[in-house]
Amino acid sequence: MTEVKKDDIVKILHTYPLCRKCDMSDEMKQEAMELCITAAEKYADNYENVSRMIKETMDKKFGASWHTVVGEGYGFEITYQLKHLLYMYCAGNLAICIWKSA
């Protein structure tokens, strides 16, 4: 019997997209979640490119001043425009937060 060390175990929170907080309209939420999943799959090893793709696409579709944070293990407190926030987990431990500010 092999012994498993704690360091060898990697916790994966989710294997599917999970929306933690969202106050967007249903249509905007669906588009934003699909965009986040696509960006995370396309640039799986580069969070900066994931963030850039999401921000630029959201700016084009829904007007300027969108912000994006992509990463693992972070906390946040933000001020945002009502009906323009999405916080989700995508592809394991990857968390994505997008919001619009005036």
Image: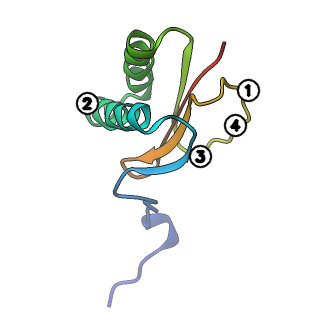
State the residue position of label 2: 42
Q: Residue at x 28, y 33 (%)?
A: 38
Q: Examine the rendered structure and indicate whether residue 57 appears above or below residue 21.
A: above
Q: CA distance from mark 1 to mark 2?
A: 29 Å
Q: CA distance from mark 1 to mark 4?
A: 10 Å
Residues at marks 3 and 1 touching, judged by CB atoms closer than 8 Å: no
Q: Quadrant of residue 102?
A: top right
State the residue position of label 1: 79
In primary-sequence order, the first of circles 1 and 2 is: 2
Q: CA distance from mark 2 to mark 3?
A: 21 Å
Q: CA distance from mark 3 to mark 1?
A: 20 Å
Q: Amino acid at mark 4?
A: Phe
In primary-sequence order, the first of circles 2 and 3 is: 2
Mark carried by residue 73 = 3
Judging depth in this view, the residue of 56 and 71 nearest the camera is 56
Q: Amino acid at mark 3?
A: Gly
Q: CA distance from mark 4 to mark 2?
A: 25 Å
Judging depth in this view, the residue of 31 and 11 nearest the camera is 31
Element marked by disc 1 = loop
State the residue position of label 4: 76
In the displayed image of the protein, which residue is found farthest to the bottom? 1
Q: Colour scheme of this structure image?
A: rainbow
